[in-house]
Image (cartoon, rainbow, N blue to C red):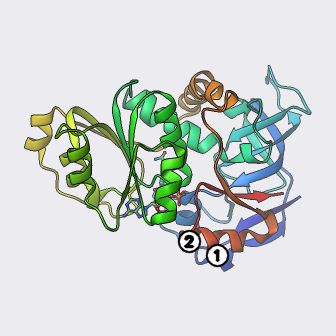
C-alpha cells in the first residue's frame, strides 16, 4: 500500500509518498481501508520534531480516520468486514490502510458524510474527556473555549452549546469570529484586539466562567485564572504559547479553582476505550440529530499531504483539513 512517511523532522517537504508494508490486524485489532484521515495540530509538532511524546522515526503520521473494515484480528467481536467506521488511531492514518484497536472504533453517526467523519474522533474524544469527563461541565454553566475556530475548538463550542451552556470563544480575525458565533458561541472574542478576561468578566456580571478549555498554556495561565468563577476548572490541552509559567496559588485557592493538564494519545488502551464509549453514548446522538456537525475546511488528496501541512501551518483554516486516500 501507499502512505505518507515522515522519515525525518523538518518542514512540510520532508513528508514522502511511499510504498510501505500493508498492516495486518494483531489480536484485538482491525485493519481499516482509509477513506480519509484528518490533520491535527500534533501532526505538525511531530513533523517539526517538537512533539512532547518522543516517537521514533520513520513513522506514518495520522491519529484519526474514516473508512471500511477489511480485516478482523483474533478476538474482535461486534464488528464486521465491510462495515464503515471512523477511528481514533495512535499513528499511521496517513495511509491507504491502518491497523486500529477495535476499542477505538466508532460506527459512523447516521446523517454524517463518511469522508467528513474522519474529522470527528480526535475532536470528539478530546472534548468529551476534557469538558464532560474531567471538568464535569454541566448544562447552564459558562465555558470559555480558546481557539474556537480550530478543529478541537469548533467541536467544543458546538458541544457546549448543545449541552445548554453559555459559550465564549476566542479566535484571531473577523472571519473566524463570525464562524465561532455560527458554531454557537454567545460571544466571540478577538484574541488580537480584546482582553478576554475583561470581556468575560463584563458579560458575566463579574462572576467569570465555570470552565476554560485552553490550548495556549503558559501565556494564558494567569489570565485564565483571572477569568474563572469560584469552583472554576481549567483543562489545558495544548501548550501552543509556551510551557513554563508562574501560578498564583493564592488566587487559585481563593477561587477553589482546579487546573488539569491532559493528553489523549498516550493514555492506556482501557482508558481510550472508556473515552470512546463516552463519546458514543453522549456525543453521537448530538451528531445524529444535527446539534453538532463536523466542520471541514477542505479535503486534499493524501499524496498531497505536504500542501495540506503547509496550509494548516499558515493558520487560515477553520475546523478540519482532510486527506482523502
Ligand atoms: N491534550 C490533548 O489530548 C489534545 C488533543 C487534541 C488536540 N490538542 C491540542 O489542541 C490544540 C488545537 O488542536 P487542533 O488540532 O484543533 O489545531 P488547530 O485547528 O490548528 O487549532 C489551533 C488553534 O489555535 C488558535 N490560536 C492560535 N493563537 C491563539 C491565541 N493567541 N489565542 C487563542 N487561540 C489561538 C487558532 O486560532 P485562530 O485560527 O483563530 O488564529 C486555532 O484555532 C493544539 O494545541 C493541540 O495540540 C490536545
Q: Is residue 316 left or right of residue 189?
A: right
Residue 313's tag is 2
**Residue 267, image x and y in percent?**
51, 38
**Residue 46, image x and y in percent?**
56, 63
Labels 1 and 2: the sequence-earlier one: 1
The residue singled out by tag 1 in the image is 12
Q: Is residue 179 left or right of residue 88?
A: left
Looking at the picture, tell me which residue is in the foreground, 203 or 224. Answer: 203
Q: Is residue 258 above or below residue 227?
A: above
Give the quadrant of residue 300.
bottom right
- SS at circle 1: helix
- Residue beneath the point at 21% across and 36% down: 229
- For disc 2, the neighbor class at 10 Å (few under 14, some 14 to 19, many from 20) is some
The reply to whether discs 1 and 2 touch (Cβ–Cβ < 8 Å) is yes
Q: How many marks?
A: 2
Looking at the picture, tell me which residue is in the foreground, 254 or 49. Answer: 254
- Residue beneath the point at 83% across and 31% down: 73
Amino acid at each position: 500500500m501507499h502512505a505518507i512517511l515522515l522519515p525525518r523532522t523538518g518542514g512540510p517537504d520532508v513528508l514522502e509518498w511511499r510504498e510501505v508494508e500493508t498492516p495486518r490486524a494483531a489480536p484485538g485489532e482491525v485493519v481499516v481501508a482509509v477513506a480519509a484521515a484528518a490533520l491535527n495540530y500534533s501532526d505538525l509538532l511531530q513533523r517539526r520534531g517538537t512533539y512532547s511524546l518522543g516517537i521514533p522515526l520513520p513513522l506514518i503520521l495520522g491519529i484519526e480516520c474514516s473508512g471500511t473494515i477489511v480485516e478482523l484480528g483474533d478476538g474482535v467481536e461486534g464488528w464486521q468486514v465491510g462495515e464503515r467506521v471512523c477511528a481514533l488511531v495512535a499513528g499511521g492514518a496517513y495511509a491507504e490502510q491502518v491497523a486500529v484497536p477495535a476499542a477505538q472504533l466508532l460506527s459512523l453517526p447516521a446523517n454524517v458524510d463518511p469522508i467528513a467523519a474522519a474529522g470527528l474522533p480526535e475532536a470528539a474524544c478530546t472534548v468529551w474527556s476534557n469538558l464532560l469527563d474531567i471538568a464535569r461541565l454541566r448544562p447552564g454553566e459558562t465555558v470559555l473555549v480558546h481557539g474556537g475556530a480550530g478543529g478541537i475548538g469548533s467541536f467544543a463550542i458546538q458541544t457546549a452549546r448543545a449541552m445548554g451552556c453559555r459559550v465564549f470563544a476566542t479566535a484571531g480575525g473577523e472571519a473566524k469570529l463570525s464562524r465561532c458565533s455560527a458554531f454557537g458561541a454567545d460571544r466571540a472574542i478577538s484574541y488580537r484586539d480584546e482582553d478576554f478576561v475583561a470581556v468575560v468578566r463584563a458579560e458575566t456580571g463579574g462572576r467569570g466562567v465555570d470552565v476554560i478549555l485552553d490550548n495556549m498554556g503558559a501565556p494564558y495561565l494567569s489570565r485564565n485564572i483571572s477569568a474563572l468563577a469560584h469552583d472554576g476548572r481549567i483543562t489545558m490541552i495544548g501548550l501552543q504559547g509556551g510551557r513554563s509559567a508562574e501560578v498564583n496559588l493564592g488566587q487559585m485557592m481563593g477561587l477553589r479553582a482546579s487546573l488539569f493538564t491532559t493528553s489523549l494519545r498516550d493514555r492506556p488502551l482501557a482508558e481510550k476505550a472508556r473515552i470512546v464509549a463516552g463519546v458514543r453514548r453522549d456525543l453521537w446522538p448530538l451528531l445524529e440529530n444535527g446539534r453538532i456537525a463536523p466542520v471541514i475546511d477542505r479535503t486534499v488528496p493524501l499524496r498531497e499531504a505536504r500542501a495540506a501541512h503547509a496550509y494548516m501551518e499558515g493558520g487560515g483554516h477553520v475546523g478540519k483539513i482532510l486527506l482523502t486516500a
